Structures are given as structure tokens and as C-alpha cells.
Image (tube, helix red, strand yellow):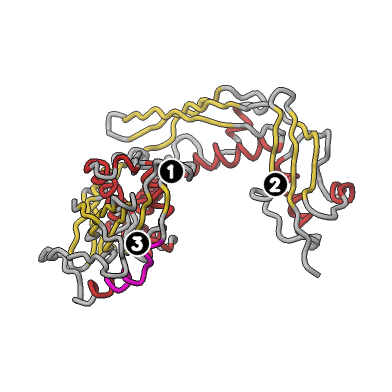
Amino acid sequence: MPVVPCSRDVSLRRPTLKRRQPAPDNPRGNGNENDKAQSATEKKPCAVTWKVSDSGVDPDSASVRFEGLQAFSESDVLKLFREKRVALTQNRLFDRSVLENAVAALKERFWSRGYEQVIIEARVDDRLRSITFLVDEGPRSQIAEFVFEGNRIFSSQDLTTRMREYLNRYDSSKNGYDAEILDYCMHTLSQFVWSKGYLQAKFSEPNKKFTDRGLIITINVDEGVLYRFGDINIEGATVFSPEQMKAMLIFHPGDIADGEALSRWLFEDLKKAYGERGYIQYTAEVTPEFKQDSEGAGVVNLKVDIDEGSLFKIRKIEFIGSNLLQDELRNLMLIGEGGTFNQLLFEDSIKKLNEAGLFQFIDKDKDVDFISNEEERLLDLRIKLTRRDN
């Protein structure tokens, strides 16, 4: 990792980076990219400095400068250094291990976004007590192909189509490889397979190969066996009986085990039912028991533990904004102070406020603060309103 001094008079000459020769199966593209990178670097002022300090006032912090940095903001890089515990302080300017750790952390972040040819140099100016990171990002790789191996039930074409569909939901992945988004899409693909009854299906870590066409990502698939639902044992419920809760199910013992339907029942349907009764802290945990019969057919028994939480009543409803008539607005609400909180009526109340047309759109999640008193089991609602311009 090159560590060289940076000229104090940056107007005399800009440091440039030499591009390594590309591997035969990984060409850079046309020869003008170095000139473009250098031109972009020369236009970026070297005067922008940042202090590497959580508080921003650490007198021992070294000034950090960046040249050629475009894929990430400078503040994001400094946040990365703090997360990786890279201490760029004045008394460690020439500590090679610290600078190597900083460059390694930054390279890893670039690689996670598909910049596999990035070059980074750290240059130290002892007189200015500063560090300059020279960055030549290079091109960003696109995903050219998915290769699935080991799959028998789900075709590679179907899996590839779904992965492309999931990735296209995110702008960052449209512009190139993004490891974080790919990981999330892999999880979404797993949920799809689980919803078809293959509850123990596993996907390997993606294996990446850089080619002249872009990234080829190979994923090994272990589908496992098809499972059907067996017994469902519910514990911890008092507000609803196990029979009432099972009546909300859209599947029955013997049906193909749809993991997605199971999640909807536990974390949407039951949560909504408890919310309408004032139990806003409802949680559930499911423990599956996987079995196979003598013929290899899979059966999954479920043990469901319910934590209902406490029943909450409404202590106060307050509307935050200018020139608001509190009593008139409370009359529009379908829930009132002193009554039991009801999630469904609360959502209908927000809808009613929106339909009144007096305020800008109210988001029931972003524009409402819930303040709970755990000991007294009371709930305050603060609804933020902004009047429409006439």
C-alpha cells in the first residue's frame, strides 16, 4: 500500500495514479478512462478537509482529504473508518498499520459495490498533519449472469427471473453490483422457495467471477424435501383461545407448508387482531419440528409461543401544529381519551383526517408518535399536522 508525502503546494502538480494492467478476462474498457479519472481528480479541490473524530473537536485528529472520490460521500467514508475503529490521529500519521487498515476498509467498501479494480493510495503531509486518500474508482461491474447449481424442483430460469425482478426494485443495483442488496434479494428468494413447502432449502454464499461480460454469480442450491403442515400447538394465549386463533388460518394439517402464509398469520393477522383489542406489544415465536416418514415425505409440527403484552388505554390525544383546534380534531377521531386503544379504529381515524382535506397527507407510521407508560399501561398519541396552503 503506497504511503507517500503529499505536496503542500497542491497547485503546482497533482498526484496521479497508475492503472495496473487488466487481467485477460477482465479488461478495463477504452483507454480514455484513466484520462477521465485524472481529469475528475484535478477538478476536485484539495482544500476540503474533515476531522476524523466522533465529536468533531478532537485536537489530536488528523485532517483527512479525498481526491477522486465519487461513489461515496466523504462523510460516509469517515463513518466507515469510525465503525472499523481506524484511528487516523496526528500522532499516528506514519503508523503504516493504521493507514493500511484505512485503505483496506475503503477498498472493501468499494468491492462491495462492484468496483473491483479500484486503486487507493494514502499520502501523508507531516507539515499540515493531514492525510490525502487518492482514489481511482475504475468501472463498476454489472451482473451479467446468474448460475444456479444443484436445483431440481425450481428451474434456473425461474430463479434467475425472480432475482432480476428483486434486484430491479433498487436503483443502486440497476447501476451495478451491490453486495448488500444482493444479500437481501437472496433472502427474498429463500422466502419464495420456503413458501412452496421447501422450508429447509438453503442457498450458498454467491461465488463471483469477473469476466469481460461482467459478473457471473454462481449459487449452489440445496432444496431439501417438501414439507406439509402437521400439528400446531399454541401456548401463552389468553385473549383468544387456540381454537379462535387457528380459525384465522388459511391452511390446515396436511397442506403444503407455506412459510409465507405462516408468517402472515403470525405477524400480520394475529398482530392486527391483538391490536384491535388494545394489545400493542403482541409478539410471537414459532419453533418448527421437522420430521420425515418412512417414505421420505416431510412433516413439520409447529409450537407457537404467544407473548400478548399488556392492555393499553389512551391517556391523551394531542395534535401538533400551528393554529389547531384540539377539541374539533378529537371529534374526528374514532378513538378517544380514556378508552382502550384500537389499532383498526386508529387507522380509520387517520384516514378520516386525510379525507377531511384540511392537512397535508398524514402518514400513520411517520407522523404519529406513540408514547407509552409501561407501569400505568397508558398511551399518548401525538399526531403531527401541517395545514394545506390555500
Q: Is residue 147 left or right of residue 342?
A: left
Mark 2, residue position: 368
Q: Residue at x 28, y 63 (%)?
A: 137
Between tags 1 and 3, which lies in front? 1
| Quadrant assignment, res 298 | top left
Q: Is residue 95 above or below residue 192?
A: above
Residue 378 appears at what percent x and percent y? 75, 30
Q: Nearer the viewer, residue 387 or 60?
A: 60
Magenta-highlighted residues: 38-47
Residue 274: image quadrant is top right
Discs 1/2, front: 1
- The residue at which mark 3 appears reads as 69
Q: Nearer the viewer, residue 381 or 198?
A: 381
Secondary-structure class at tag 2: strand
Spatial CA span between label 3 and label 2: 39 Å
Task: Relative to 58, say whether 14 is above or below.
Answer: below
The residue sitting at 89% across, 51% down in the picture is 328
- The location of residue 337, given as percent across then percent down, is 83, 37
* Quadrant of the snapshot with the C terminus: bottom right
Give residue 53's mark: 1
Q: Is residue 235 visible?
A: yes
Q: Report, in whole angstroms, how far the alpha carbon at label 1 lies from the one at label 3.
A: 20 Å
Q: CA distance from mark 1 to mark 2?
A: 34 Å
Residue at x-position 28% and y-position 53%: 125
Look at the image and tell me whether residue 204 can be seen: no
Is-magenta flag for residue 43? yes
Task: Give the residue type that dot 2 points to.
Answer: Val
